[in-house]
Amino acid sequence: MRQFFILIFAITLITGLISCDRKKVFEAYHRIDEKGWNKDSVIVFKVHLTDTIKNNNLFVNIRNKGTYAYSNIYLFMTIGSPDGVMRTDTVEFTLADPSGKWRGSGIGGLHDSQIPYKSSVYFPHKGEYTFMIKQGMRDNVLQGIRDVGFRIEKTY
């Protein structure tokens, strides 16, 4: 009987862990070179999307070191659709409040922020979408950014 309860508990736990992030369509990170993020370096995420009905929210995930010299970051965001159309935005994301306290979560010298980029985005074509991110700061080589990620989630 005890084994039965252990089995039920294990199944419940695994099911709960799997379904915790039901909204997620895509999420990945790109590690930035230890020497810094060169202004000519493009981070590329390729995502095969098949749902042309539901809207999605887009997020940029930034992991910065406590030594990052700025409270914000400018990014050039380009979305390429399967039909060849490319759209580019210049966006500013705030990583620290005016007092200098880092936003998001963090342990030690590493801070993780998930920042809304676009909400209720509709992808009209099935196929491979390309999401490209370049740093738009004035530094030729930007120091203090460790990882850049991209997330797509369903709006429900």
Image (cartoon, rainbow, N blue to C red):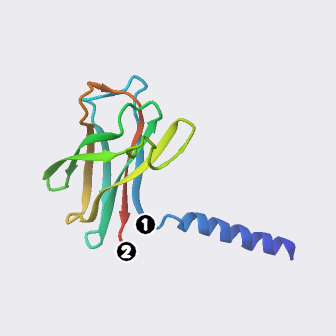
Q: Which image quadrant is residue 9 in?
A: bottom right
Q: Pointer 2: what residue?
A: 156
Residue 112 horizontal side relative to residue 11, left or right: left
Above or below for 103 versus 137:
below
- Quadrant that contains the C terminus: bottom left
The tag on residue 23 is: 1
**How many callouts does the rendering have?**
2
For image coordinates 19% across by 54% down, the residue present is 81
- Quadrant that contains the N terminus: bottom right
For image coordinates 49% across by 64% down, the residue present is 21
Q: Please name the amino acid that badge 1 sits on.
A: Lys
Q: Which image quadrant is residue 30 in?
A: top left
First along the sequence among labels 1 and 2: 1
Q: CA distance from mark 1 to mark 2?
A: 8 Å
Residue 118 in the image: state x and y as whole percent.
Answer: 27, 59
Residue 98 horizontal side relative to residue 82, left or right: right
- Per the image, label 2 sits on a secondary structure element best described as loop
Q: Please identify the residue farthest to the front as the structure is shown.
A: 99
Q: Nearer the viewer, residue 11 or 103?
A: 103
For image coordinates 26% across by 24% down, the residue present is 140
Q: Residues within 10 Å of mark 1 (few under 14, many from 20)?
A: some
Residue 95 horizontal side relative to residue 18, left or right: left
Q: Please identify the residue farthest to the bottom as the structure is shown.
A: 1
Q: Nearer the viewer, residue 12 or 32?
A: 32
Residue 57 in the image: state x and y as whole percent.
Answer: 32, 62
For image coordinates 54% across by 66% down, the residue present is 20
Q: Please name the amino acid that badge 2 sits on.
A: Tyr
CB under 8 Å between callouts 1 and 2? yes
Residue 106 in the image: state x and y as whole percent.
Answer: 53, 44
Q: Residues within 10 Å of mark 2 (few under 14, many from 20)?
A: few
Residue 126 in the image: state x and y as whole percent.
Answer: 24, 63
